[in-house]
């Protein structure tokens, strides 16, 4: 599902980019056709058209990753003719090219993360301010407040051209806002899928853990039955490998079963049974058995290991326990 959402986003982003390029291309083309402009400005508009035809062709064939990497380069190239067009239009009293400075930040917010979009928005604001400053300098310092002479345009032609230009900017803004919402919905779908996937993994993990618990509980039952019936711990050389061989169970599984069910390791479990055996011998006849006989008969290989295991389990030494039993009789 995550892969499907990614593919959906990539296709939508490519379609969105092409849509913006087509809108800008139409704006340049209509400006050439509708405005009665002098030749220098027509050349600038033709450059703008060319700068949009080439990306339109390229976007159809290159992967989405290259499209995203190329957007910044395209913006830099597109802003240069747009800057000159805006200055010349302002000198004539045409303000609609300024509307595109509003479209650019919205487009950037749609195409990039907020941090990158904010940086480019600041750049657009700075460029707009530079446009006003340069226009002011040209209008009042260079041309001495005299308008540039253009071929005459009727009032209807001027208003119609301005309305078309303004309408295209509104279309571009609406187009960007639509895709902002659309991309947001795709991201919500990705988050929901990620949550569902996480929940599924957690549920599967819980099921597997429960199955493991049941499996190791059964193994531990086999261990206790084996130890209590065959008393292999009475042999001081008894190892977990021997128990694994006798039960036909991997030693690692045996160790894990002991740890999960008794929270101790194999040696501690064996010593537990050995201490219980030693206590049984002490209680049966205190005068008959020596401590050496008791620890050796219980499976301990030395008195030091016997004393350590006994005190760890009973909180008193074997001698102290021996005296307690003797005094009670």
Image (cartoon, rainbow, N blue to C red):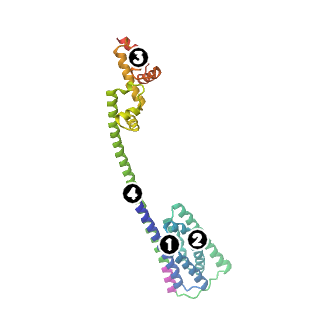
N-terminal of the pair, mark 3 or mark 4, is 4
Question: Could you tell me which residue is drawn at 51 percent across and 80 percent down?
Answer: 162
Q: Is residue 224 above or below residue 93?
A: above
Q: Which residue is mark 1?
A: 59
Structural distance between the alpha carbons of marks 3 and 1: 90 Å
Label 2 or label 1, whichever lies nearer to me, is 1
N-terminal of the pair, mark 2 or mark 1, is 1
Question: Could you tell me which residue is drawn at 51 percent across and 61 percent down?
Answer: 114
Q: Which residue is mark 4?
A: 193
161 drawn magenta: yes
Q: Which residue is mark 3?
A: 293
The image's mark for residue 76 is: 2
Q: Nearer the viewer, residue 39 or 273?
A: 273
Horizontal and vertical percent position of residue 32:
54, 83
N-terminal of the pair, mark 4 or mark 2, is 2
Structural distance between the alpha carbons of marks 2 and 1: 17 Å
Horizontal and vertical percent position of residue 183:
44, 64
In the rendered image, the quadrant that contains the N terminus is bottom left
Q: Nearer the viewer, residue 111 or 101?
A: 111
Task: Kindly report the secondary structure that dominates the magenta region of the rendered protein.
Answer: helix
Label 4, secondary structure: give it. helix
Structural distance between the alpha carbons of marks 4 and 1: 29 Å
In the rendered image, the quadrant that contains the C terminus is top left
Horizontal and vertical percent position of residue 237:
42, 27
N-terminal of the pair, mark 3 or mark 2, is 2
Number of residues whose C-alpha sits closer than 10 Å to that of mark 4, classed few (under 14), some (14–19) or many (20 or more): some
Horizontal and vertical percent position of residue 59:
50, 72
Label 3 or label 2, whichever lies nearer to me, is 3
Residue 251 is at least partly visible in this image = yes
Badge 3 vs badge 1, beta-carbon distance below 8 Å: no
Structural distance between the alpha carbons of marks 4 and 2: 37 Å
Residue 264 is at least partly visible in this image = no
């Amino acid at each position: 599902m995550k892969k499907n959402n990614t593919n959906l986003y990539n296709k939508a982003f490519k379609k969105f980019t092409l849509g913006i390029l087509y809108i800008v291309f139409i704006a340049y083309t209509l400006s050439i056709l509708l405005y009665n402009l002098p030749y220098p400005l027509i050349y600038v508009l033709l450059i703008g058209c060319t700068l949009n035809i080439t990306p339109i062709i390229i976007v159809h064939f290159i992967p989405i990753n290259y499209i995203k990497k190329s957007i910044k380069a395209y913006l830099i190239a597109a802003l240069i003719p747009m800057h000159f067009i805006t200055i010349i239009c302002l000198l004539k009293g045409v303000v609609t090219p300024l509307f595109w400075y509003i479209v650019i930040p919205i487009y950037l917010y749609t195409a990039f993360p907020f941090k990158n979009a904010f940086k480019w928005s600041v750049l657009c604001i700075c460029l707009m301010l530079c446009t006003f400053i340069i226009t002011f300098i040209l209008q009042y310092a260079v041309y001495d407040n005299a308008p540039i002479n253009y071929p005459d345009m009727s009032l209807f032609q001027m208003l119609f051209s301005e309305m078309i230009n303004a309408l295209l900017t509104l279309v571009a803004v609406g187009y960007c806002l639509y895709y902002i919402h659309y991309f947001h919905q795709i991201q919500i779908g990705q988050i929901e899928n990620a949550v569902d996937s996480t929940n599924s993994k957690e549920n599967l993990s819980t099921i597997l853990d429960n199955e493991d618990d049941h499996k190791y509980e059964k193994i531990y039952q086999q261990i206790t039955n084996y130890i209590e019936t065959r008393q292999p711990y009475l042999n001081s050389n008894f190892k977990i490998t021997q128990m694994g061989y006798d039960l036909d169970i991997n030693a690692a599984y045996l160790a894990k079963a002991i740890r999960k069910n008794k929270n101790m390791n194999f040696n501690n479990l064996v010593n537990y049974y050995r201490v219980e055996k030693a206590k049984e011998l002490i209680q049966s006849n205190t005068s008959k058995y020596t401590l050496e006989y008791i620890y050796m008969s219980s499976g301990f290989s030395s008195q030091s290991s016997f004393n350590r295991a006994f005190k760890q389990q009973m909180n008193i030494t074997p001698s102290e326990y021996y005296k307690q039993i003797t005094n009670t009789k």
